[in-house]
Every structure is written in C-alpha cells, then in structure tokens.
Amino acid sequence: MKKTLFLLSTLALLAACNHEDKAPAKPAPPSVQATLVPPTPPTDQWVGKWIGVEGLNLTIAKDDAIGRGHYILTMQYGLDAGDTGTFKGEEADDGIAFTRPDGPQMLRAGDGEATGLKWLADKKDCLIVATGEGYCRQ
C-alpha cells in the first residue's frame, strides 16, 4: 500500500512539474510598434485632386472597402476620350502601383521639373506616372 501511495504521489508531482503556464503573448512596446508599420501610409497624403496639362487630371481616394494602403484612382490620363478611367491602386515602395489598359503603372512623388512638362516645371508638389505624364497640386 505504501508503494502504491508513493507511486501515485510521485506521478502527481511529475504531472504538476510538467505543467507549463502559457501566458498570452505580450504586444510589442509602443516604441517598437512605431517602427514596424507607420500609422498611415505616406501615400495617404496624396488623397485629393491633382491637375495635369490640357485637361488631364487625377483624383485619389482611399479604398476603405479594402483597407489600409489601397486607393481608387480616377483619371483622365490622355487626350483621347478613351484615355479615362477608374483604377484600383495599392501602396508600394515607390508610390502607388496600379494597372490601366496601357499596362502596369507606378505613381510616384516628384516636382514639376520631373514631369518633363514645361507647363508644370515651376510646381513643387507633383505625382508622376512617366515622363510627359504628371499631375500637380495647385
């Protein structure tokens, strides 16, 4: 009987020692979280209306249905009536990536000189798709 009691006590102690308390993972401190993901993407500052030359224009809105870093781009990007549309864009390393009928594009920040358009050369706050296609804030 003593052996059985000793054996059961030993098993109970071993079971208790083997039990691990699993505390929930703690979130990273705010200072670390701030370095992981910015609270808002820098491209959120681009939301609004941008003007190009000869009637070209671009309007950027957040796509809240999808979430952070997603945008809806409404643009007249060429002089032909068919060079207009609304496109979904997504934050990328260099700006906002989107695709329109003429292929994948990247909207990036620059100044008027970088647009390659003499009518915008003196502007400071611009977005550029390619040389010859740019939009600036007024």
Image: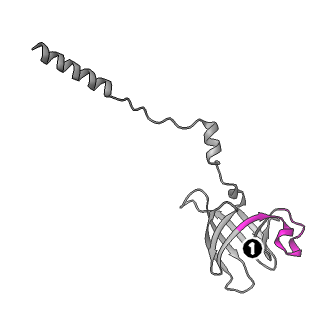
- Would you identify the image quadrant in which residue 73 lies? bottom right
**Relative depth, front residue between 4 and 43:** 4
Residue that carries the numbered disc 1 in the rendered image = 57
**Residue 18 locus on image (x, y percent):** 31, 28
**Relative depth, front residue between 35 and 17:** 17
| 10 Å crowding of disc 1: few (<14), some (14-19), many (20+) | many
**Residue 49 locus on image (x, y percent):** 73, 66
**Residue 43 locus on image (x, y percent):** 69, 58
Quarter of the image where the N terminus is located: top left
Residue interval drawn in magenta:
107-124
- Would you identify the image quadrant in which residue 55 lies? bottom right
Residue plotted at (50% across, 35% down): 26
In the image, is residue 122 part of the stretch drawn in magenta?
A: yes
Q: Residue furthest top?
A: 2
Q: Is residue 90 left or right of residue 124?
A: left
Residue plotted at (78% across, 72% down): 134
